[in-house]
């Protein structure tokens, strides 16, 4: 009887421990979703694009849903070449198009902290230089298929007008991370002025959770 009692107590302890672990994991997941965002805008002139952002140093794969390779010369990869000006044509973006970037998490298994996202948008003429609605979804290393962590930017109070011709939209949080332990980023473009425009570059700025040479870091 004593043995049975010890087995029952042990089983109960294991179940309780598992329940505590599940609750802690749930809280951790909720914390990841609590991103805050501010936007800043560059109007007039084209700021320099980064050539060392995560899309150029930690890129793994891309899922392109709608970006148009016009004339066969403006592939999605133009958004990852370090050129943010319209001297090198970029792919066409239309309402509802999205692009999902997966980072290399085989070596940096902790994922990446994302501090800002720069989107270079424009056109050679007027009338296609505004995006009024933008969604940014993140998945984390715990499940790179779960994009429930999201920043929604849109509405009448937010207009990413980059007139006269092209410019940069920056999404950041004043130096804080937009998201942590990120495995992939999905950007969906909505309310593009007159239906479509042109993208030149997307810079996703961040760092690996465990940087090279770092033995241990609490995040
Ligand atoms: Ca870049
Ligand atoms: Ca480019």
Image (tube, rainbow, N blue to C red):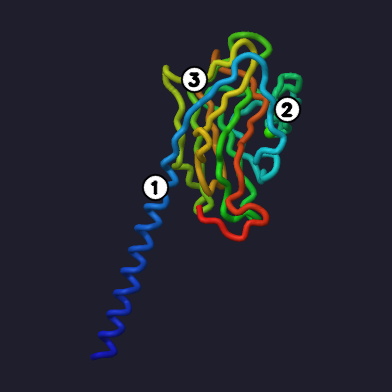
The answer to whether the residue labelled 3 contacts the one labelled 1, judged by CB atoms less than 8 Å apart, is: no
Residue 100 spot, x, y in % from top left: 58, 38
On the rendering, which quadrant does ligand 1 occupy? top right
Choose between 10 and 213: the one closer to the eye.
Answer: 213
Choose between 217 and 82: the one closer to the eye.
Answer: 217
Give me the disc on residue 30: 1
- Residue at the farthest top position: 126
Q: Is mark 2 within 8 Å of ligand 2?
A: yes
Q: Which residue is mark 2?
A: 83
Tell me the mark number nearer the camera, choosing from 3 and 1. 1
Give me the disc on residue 132: 3
Q: Is residue 4 above or below residue 79?
A: below
Left or right? Give the position of 10 relative to 114. left
Tell me the SS state at disc 2: loop
Residue 49 spot, x, y in % from top left: 68, 28
Tell me the mark number nearer the camera, choosing from 2 and 3. 2
Gap in angstroms between the C-alphas marked 2 and 3: 24 Å
Residue 56 spot, x, y in % from top left: 70, 39
């Amino acid at each position: 009887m004593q043995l049975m009692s010890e087995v029952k107590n042990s089983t109960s302890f294991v179940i309780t421990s598992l329940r505590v672990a599940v609750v802690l994991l749930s809280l951790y997941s909720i914390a990841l979703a609590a991103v805050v965002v501010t936007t800043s805008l560059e109007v007039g002139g084209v700021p320099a694009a980064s050539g060392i952002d995560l899309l150029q140093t930690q890129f793994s794969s891309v899922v392109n849903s709608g970006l148009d390779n016009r004339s066969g010369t403006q592939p999605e990869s133009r958004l990852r070449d370090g050129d943010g000006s319209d001297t090198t044509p970029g792919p066409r973006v239309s309402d509802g198009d999205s692009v999902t970037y997966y980072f290399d998490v085989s070596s940096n298994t902790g994922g990446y902290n994302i501090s800002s996202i720069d989107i270079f948008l424009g056109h050679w003429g007027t009338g296609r230089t505004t995006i009024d609605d933008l969604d940014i979804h993140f998945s984390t290393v715990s499940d790179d298929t779960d994009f429930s962590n999201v920043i929604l930017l849109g509405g009448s109070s937010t207009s990413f007008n980059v007139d006269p011709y092209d410019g940069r939209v920056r999404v950041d949080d004043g130096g804080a991370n937009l998201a942590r332990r990120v495995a992939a980023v999905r950007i969906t473009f909505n309310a593009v002025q007159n239906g479509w425009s042109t993208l030149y570059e997307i810079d996703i700025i961040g760092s690996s959770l465990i940087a090279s040479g770092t033995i241990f870091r609490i995040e």
